[in-house]
Image (cartoon, rainbow, N blue to C red):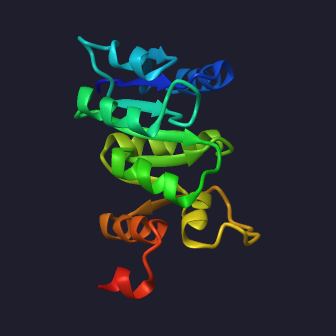
Amino acid sequence: MEKIRITIADSHFLSRKGLAVVLDENKDFTLIAEALSTSDLINQSKFYPPHLIIIDYTSSNFSLEGLQQIVKKYPTTKLLAITQPLPAAKISQALTAGVTSHLLKDCDQDEIVEAIYKTVKGEQFMCGKIVTYILQDATETTTSTCEGLNISEREMEIIKLVAEGFSNKEVAD
């Protein structure tokens, strides 16, 4: 079986190195590059594009707008975002821009590995806390876990509509 080629795109040194350790511990993964910015990422991997880009689109030198450039450059590559907690609208924008799966930086190694496998297969994978942020008022205190959730395309469509502020009736319509 071919190894899963992965690029890490994050401007934070410790985040990149931590993810590199996680990848190195799995025989199915190979880290092919690290990118410190969107332009860095766009100019890499011309001959062997990654199967997966793990990206923190909120770190400096990356942006939601940059995601569109990345998707255009790597149309068959899947994007797994790993970020700090964000407002539901920003997560929705990232999903619309091309992010396949989304985790939080406080997720554990097993969840990251599971997200990588599922994302590369084209499945959407979300940290349980992200779904909670989207579905509940951000001011409420929650006791949700970071345990991953497999989400169908229809469920993802509904989550995006809720995150964009549509009412229950509007979502149903």
Depth order, front residue of 65/37 = 65
Percent x, y of residue 42: 34, 19
Percent x, y of residue 91: 49, 53
Percent x, y of residue 144: 68, 66
Percent x, y of residue 4: 36, 27
Depth order, front residue of 17/66 = 66
User: Compared to 137, does 115 lie above or below?
Assistant: above
Which residue is at 23% across, 34% downward? 76
Q: How many marks?
A: 0
Which residue is at 34% across, 13% downward? 44
| Quadrant in which the C terminus is drawn | bottom left
Which residue is at 24% across, 32% downward? 72
**In the shown orientation, is residue 151 left or right of residue 17?**
left
Using the rendered view, name the quadrant where residue 77 is placed. Answer: top left
| Quadrant in which the N terminus is drawn | top left
Using the rendered view, name the quadrant where residue 70 is placed. Answer: top left
Depth order, front residue of 6/171 = 171
